[in-house]
Amino acid sequence: MISDKDRKNMKQFYNAILTLKTEDEVAKFFDDVATIKEVLDLASRLEVARMLTEKKVFSEISKETGASSATISRVNKCLNYGDGGYKTALDRLK
């Protein structure tokens, strides 16, 4: 369960991201708030989502990205039953 304090912190975090205007600003922000491993993991999940939307198979995705089957399954579940965040982001990147 997410507490009210956690919701407030998440909202502040999301709004902070929305204030950033350039790729350089976003990179600097994430360099400060996350480890390189965390950022790489997030970036990998987005790539997994992109590949799943292109109907790539799990084994190919795992080979190309190094993502585990658990990560690929979780991303696939989000694509099929989630709130549409991956779809929105990927559509806007096109």
Image: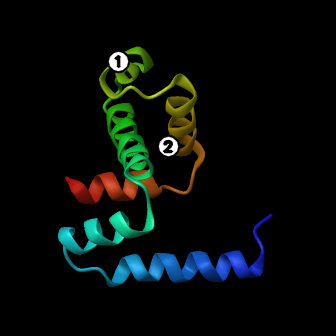
Give the labeled residue for mark 2: 79
Could you say which disc has been placed on residue 63 in the image? 1
Horizontal relation, residue 39 to residue 21: left or right: right
Question: Residue 45, position in %: x, y?
Answer: 42, 42
Residue found at the far top of this picture: 59
CA gap, disc 2 and disc 1: 20 Å
Question: Residue 94, position in %: x, y?
Answer: 19, 52
Q: Quadrant of residue 4?
A: bottom right
Number of the front mark, 2 or 1: 1
Say which residue appears at 78% left-offset and 74% top-offset.
Answer: 3
Among the two numbered marks 2 and 1 on one chain, the one whose residue lies closer to the N terminus: 1
Q: How many marks?
A: 2
Q: Quadrant of residue 30?
A: bottom left
Instruction: Please name whichever residue, 63 or 83, is drawn nearer the observer in this view of the structure.
Output: 63
Say which residue appears at 26% left-offset and 60% top-offset.
Answer: 92
Label 2: element kind = helix
Question: Residue 41, position in %: x, y?
Answer: 43, 44
Say which residue appears at 67% left-offset and 77% top-offset.
Answer: 7
Amino acid type indicated by mark 1: Lys
Horizontal relation, residue 79 to residue 2: left or right: left
Whether the residues at callouts 2 and 1 have beta carbons within 8 Å, the answer is: no
Mark 1 Cα-neighbour bin, 10 Å: few <14, some 14–19, many ≥20: few
Amino acid type indicated by mark 2: Leu
Q: Quadrant of residue 63?
A: top left
Say which residue appears at 39% left-offset and 52% top-offset.
Answer: 39
- Which image quarter is the N terminus in? bottom right
